[in-house]
Amino acid sequence: MTLNERIVHDLKEAMKAREQTRLDVIRMLKSAVQMAAIEKGGATAVLDDAEVEAVIRKQVKQRRDSIASFEKGGRPELAAKEQTELEILQAYLPKGLTSEELAAMIDATIQEVGATTKAQLGLVMKALQPKLAGRADGKTVSQEVGKRLQ
């Protein structure tokens, strides 16, 4: 089952179960995927799993940014709503790396590239991105690489 098919299936299941929050999030996700497909190649275009995953990651990032803004603005009820939506969206992404796995991957890549200074952070990140394949947040990875290159 492709990611697109899973989204449609889950949308139907949420309708049947009358789970309004889940239904709203999946509808929003389906709409975002359709918009990305239209931008890619018109009304008949279909995204592959990697492209759908990129759309989901973008939605996850928006939720994280919103949570931070709402918490900073003193709106915990809105932050809680965004957190719920974030959890629903994360169910469609592959399982993330543990901190130990991420640290090992970063160390191995630093050794592989031969980086020794913080000025080479971009080189390490460029080598790391294909290995991570979206299983870790780019901001977190960048911070960890920066710590190791000091």
Image (cartoon, helix red, strand yellow):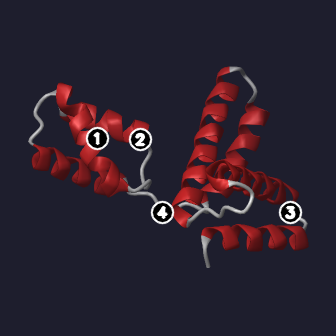
- Callout in the foreground (4, 2): 2
Q: Name the residue beneath numbered marker 3.
A: 19
Between discs 3 and 1, the one toward the N terminus:
3
Tell me the distance, in whole angstroms, between the alpha carbons under discs 1 and 2. Answer: 9 Å
Crowding at mark 3 (Cα within 10 Å: few <14, some 14-19, many 20+): few
Q: Residue at x 28, y 41 (%)?
A: 125
Query: Which label belongs to residue 125?
Result: 1
Residue 127 visible in image: yes
The foreground one among 133 and 51 is: 51
Find residue 13 and report its image quarter.
Answer: bottom right
Q: Residue at x 76, y 27 (%)?
A: 75
Labels 3 & 1 near each other (Cβ < 8 A) = no
> On the picture, is 127 further left or further right than 129?
left
Query: Which label belongs to residue 66?
Result: none
Find residue 89 and report its image quarter.
Answer: bottom right
Give amino acid for label 4: Lys
Task: Please tell me whether residue 120 is drawn above or below residue 50 in the rendered image.
Answer: above
Tell me the distance, in whole angstroms, between the alpha carbons under discs 3 and 4. Answer: 24 Å
Find numbered disc 1 in the image and state the secondary structure of the residue it sits on. Answer: helix
Between discs 2 and 3, the one toward the N terminus:
3
Crowding at mark 2 (Cα within 10 Å: few <14, some 14-19, many 20+): some
Give amino acid for label 1: Met
Q: Name the residue beneath numbered marker 4.
A: 95
Between discs 3 and 4, the one toward the N terminus:
3
> On the picture, is 93 further left or further right than 124?
right
Q: Percent from the top left, x then y, of residue 43? A: 75, 57
Between discs 4 and 2, the one toward the N terminus:
4
Q: Name the residue beneath numbered marker 2.
A: 138
The foreground one among 103 and 2 is: 2
The foreground one among 44 and 149 is: 44
Tell me the distance, in whole angstroms, between the alpha carbons under discs 4 and 2. Answer: 15 Å
In which quadrant will I find the C terminus? top left
